[in-house]
Amino acid sequence: MLNRVAALVEKRGLPRDHVLTDVELDKAIRSRGDTVETFYYGHDYGTGTLARFFAMADRDQIELYPEEETLRALLRQEGWLAPGVDAALISLPAVGAGPKVTHAVRTAILQHELSHGEFFSNPVYAEYVHNFWLTALTTGERAAFRSFLASEEYDSSVEELMFNEMQAYLMFTHDTLFFSPSRADFAPARLAELQTLFLNGMPRGWLRSMLASSRESPSSAQ
């Protein structure tokens, strides 16, 4: 349902100006040693991105999968394809979708994706994240995050993708299977400093409360 959107929007090395055909999508998935289930373990997209995807698919006369047409119908039903709607779609893999997807891993992915949901549906939070990226991180730290994200197959030339993923990995990804200070070339003390700074300045709301609660819990210590 969402792999073709991912290919258009965020996967490194794939075109941003047109929607892949079935053959092109299959080649992109197989060339990385992935399957349909493992191409992405979690998806997150704002409504504007989804509307753009379907408009481009129609423009290019791409025949979409039934699952993708079901998605379009659901988005229309909710009114999410209309201009100016601030909402977000996230997805999670089923336990067992890949050899690494345990219950604990699925929980970690959920927390990561929830932060993306807030980013896409709350302009105040998105602006906070953007400002944090520009002012709290040094030029070298932004470059380090960009390099880490590129290694994870994200398109590092898409600036919004970079600072959106920064907040999700920095603050909401505690499983070392997905993220650790060394993988982004950060000293643990500096990472902890940035995490405290981010939390202290966060706009109030459910996401801040969830994050504060998880940091207070002894079981959340890494």
Image (tube, rainbow, N blue to C red):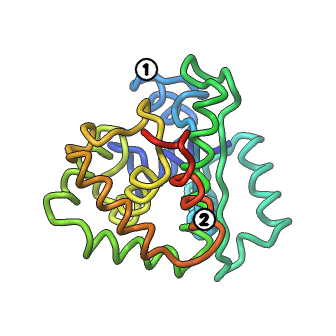
Q: Quadrant of residue 100?
A: top right
Give the residue pinned by disc 1: 33
Rendered location of residue 159, percent (x, y) = 33, 65
Q: Is residue 151 left or right of residue 73?
A: left
Circle 2 sits in a helix, a strand or a loop, which is it?
A: helix
Q: Residue at x 35, y 68 (%)?
A: 197
Q: Residue at x 38, y 50 (%)?
A: 15
**Mark 1 or mark 2: which comes first in sequence?**
1
Rendered location of residue 171, percent (x, y) = 44, 55
Residue 59 visible in the displayed image:
no
Q: Nearer the viewer, mark 1 or mark 2?
A: 2
Residue 93 visible in the displayed image:
yes
Give the residue pinned by disc 2: 207
Q: Is residue 104 above or below residue 168?
A: above
Q: Residue at x 80, y 66 (%)?
A: 76
Circle 1 sits in a helix, a strand or a loop, which is it?
A: loop
Rendered location of residue 217, percent (x, y) = 57, 48
C-alpha span from label 1 to label 2 = 35 Å
Q: Is residue 170 above or below residue 37?
A: below
Front residue of this view, candidates 55 and 173: 173
Instruction: Please state which amino acid type lies under the numbered disc 1.
Output: Gly
Location of the C terminus (image quadrant): top left
Q: Residue at x 68, y 42 (%)?
A: 1
